[in-house]
Image: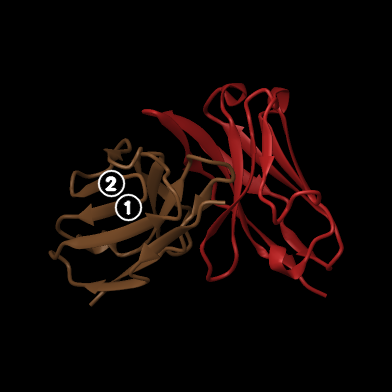
Chain colours: A red, B brown
Amino acid sequence: EVQLVESGGGLVKPGGSLRLSCAASGFTFSSYSMNWVRQAPGKGLEWVSYISSSSSYIYYADSVKGRFTISRDNAKNSLYLQMNSLRAEDTAVYYCAREESYGSGSYPGCWGQGTLVTVSS
Amino acid sequence: EIVLTQSPATLSLSPGEGATLSCRASQSVSSYLAWYQQKPGQAPRLLIYDASNRATGIPARFSGSGSGTDFTLTISSLEPEDFAVYYCQQRSNWPQTFGQGTKLEIK
């Protein structure tokens, strides 16, 4: 069974740092690109970052560029998001999502259950 | 950045009725558009990819159409479990973006 399990969320003060992890199981992690997508309380979905299977391609949303760093360890079947200089507006549930190839394109097709990050003093 | 605008924001219907949800892109995304369903407390679930193709295990009552800038998600006959929030997403350009969502609620 494919599983994605996020961890590392919690309460952090503005300006602080947090590292999220996503543990993958049930599939060959090294063959898939991955995403982080977040959802502020009561709000819609916002894509945060993408990393290709071999880490050759990395993209960020403008809202997090320069503050967040995505990485992965294929030997440990794990995805990470290092979040620095956190702001109140970063408060959200953070999902990791596996990129899957469908037809002509690829889309986040398998999602974890998310981990809540709260930025507050 | 491509902006996706979904309408209506909220749609109130009864089980058995048909639903039509719209997603409009600020510039062409070709057919690189997906639809997701999200229920309270759950992660999103991929319904439709490449504008008109159902993902694995998605019932036939869900269908997608459109290309370029105008897209539609149609649910032919609503089941109780279909009441949820629906998001469109484009994968044509970076950054990938989501629409703001349409809440489908029971009338």
Helix, strand, or loop for circle 1? strand
> Which residue lies most toward the front here?
B27
Quadrant of residue B79 within the rendered picture: bottom left
Q: CA distance from mark 2 to mark 1?
A: 6 Å
Helix, strand, or loop for circle 2? strand
- The answer to whether the residues at label 2 and label 1 have Cβ atoms under 8 Å apart is yes
Q: Position of residue B88 (x, y in %)?
A: 41, 53
Residue for point 39% across, 44% down: B33
Q: Position of residue B63 (x, y in %)?
A: 23, 47
Q: Identify which amino acid the numbered label 2 is placed on.
A: Gly
Specify the label residue B70 is tagged with.
1
Quick check: A71 above or below A117?
above
Depth order, front residue of B26/A99: B26
Quadrant of residue A120 within the rendered picture: bottom right
Quick check: A54 above or below A90?
above
Classify mark 2: residues with Cα within 10 Å, few (<14), some (14-19) or many (20+). Answer: some
Work out whether residue A2 can be spotted: no
Q: Identify which amino acid the numbered label 1 is placed on.
A: Asp
Depth order, front residue of A55/A74: A55
Q: Which residue is mark 2?
A: B66
**Figure disc tally:** 2
Quarter of the picture holding the C terminus of chain A = bottom right
Residue for point 39% across, 45% down: B34
Residue for point 21% across, 72% down: B13
Work out whether residue A117 can be spotted: yes
Quick check: B44 above or below B8?
above
Q: Position of residue A99 (x, y in %)?
A: 52, 34
Tell me the subunit letter for badge 2.
B
